[in-house]
Image (cartoon, rainbow, N blue to C red):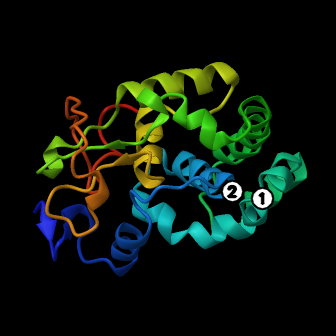
Amino acid sequence: MEDIINARCGWAGTDELYIKYHDEEWGRPVSDDKTLFEFLVLESAQAGLSWLTVLRKREGYRRAFHGFDVEKVAQMTAEDVERLMSFDEIVKNRLKINSTINNAKLFIAVQKEFGSFYRYVLSFFPNHQPVVNHFRALSQIPAVSPESEAMSRDMKRRGFRFFGPTICYAFFQATGFVDDHIEGCFCKAPQYAKSQPHVQSACAIDNRGSVGNKCGN
């Protein structure tokens, strides 16, 4: 895979949906808890699948889970689970559907404890600040980080499911807690040009640079 294609990270390729996601969302800082919950749902659903598969079902997930309203999702019942098992617009995996409802309840608990889920995520980062990496090749992008390992471990302790360190790192990338646009990509945040590299050992990566890799998460 080429590192840069048409002035953007090569993993975006030529698929229009992937390009739009890369250009308009991936790596852009998110502080709104509703959007963070949306990505928590989508990243958890992605486990074991390609990210593009989930992106193509995104609007289905929006319809299935009340527009990602965490309060409403937390109140969903076993009857809702059965209904969604027949809903073709999402991944029909009973464990993942149940985990979405379970995770919504825990998401609310975290909000109450920390004031917001955003503040909870930042608590795992040095100086409570996002990280900007300065990788020059897709092969340098890691699958996990100390922050994703720490947060996924804490989330597991709290009872969250389908949110291992690899999924957690992809969540960081998607919501801008980590900027992994490689050097030469037009989306690279210029205001962070002087930030220090945050180097991790690389794992085998898929065509997104992290999620869906072969590292076992």
Q: For numbered disc 2, what is the local secondary structure?
A: helix
Which quadrant of the rendered structure holds the N terminus? Answer: bottom left
Q: Position of residue 115 (x, y in %)?
A: 74, 37
Q: Is residue 9 above or below residue 139?
A: below
At 45% from the left edge and 63% from the top edge, which residue is drawn?
53
Q: Which residue is mark 2?
A: 34
Q: Nearer the viewer, mark 2 or mark 1?
A: 2
Amino acid type shown at disc 1: Asp
In the picture, the disc for residue 69 is: 1
Is there a contact, CB below 8 Å, between mark 2 and mark 1? yes
Q: Quick one: which residue is furthest to the top in this view?
A: 157
Q: Position of residue 133 (x, y in %)?
A: 25, 44
Of 99 and 197, nearer the camera is 197
Displayed quadrant of residue 154: top right
Q: For numbered disc 1, what is the local secondary structure?
A: loop
Q: Is residue 84 above or below residue 155?
A: below
Of 216 and 132, nearer the camera is 132
Q: Position of residue 110 (x, y in %)?
A: 73, 33
Gap between marks 2 and 1 measured at Cα: 7 Å
Q: Is residue 162 visible?
A: no
Crowd rating for badge 2 (residues with CA inside 10 Å; few <14, some 14–19, many 20+): some
Q: Earlier in the sequence, mark 2 or mark 1?
A: 2
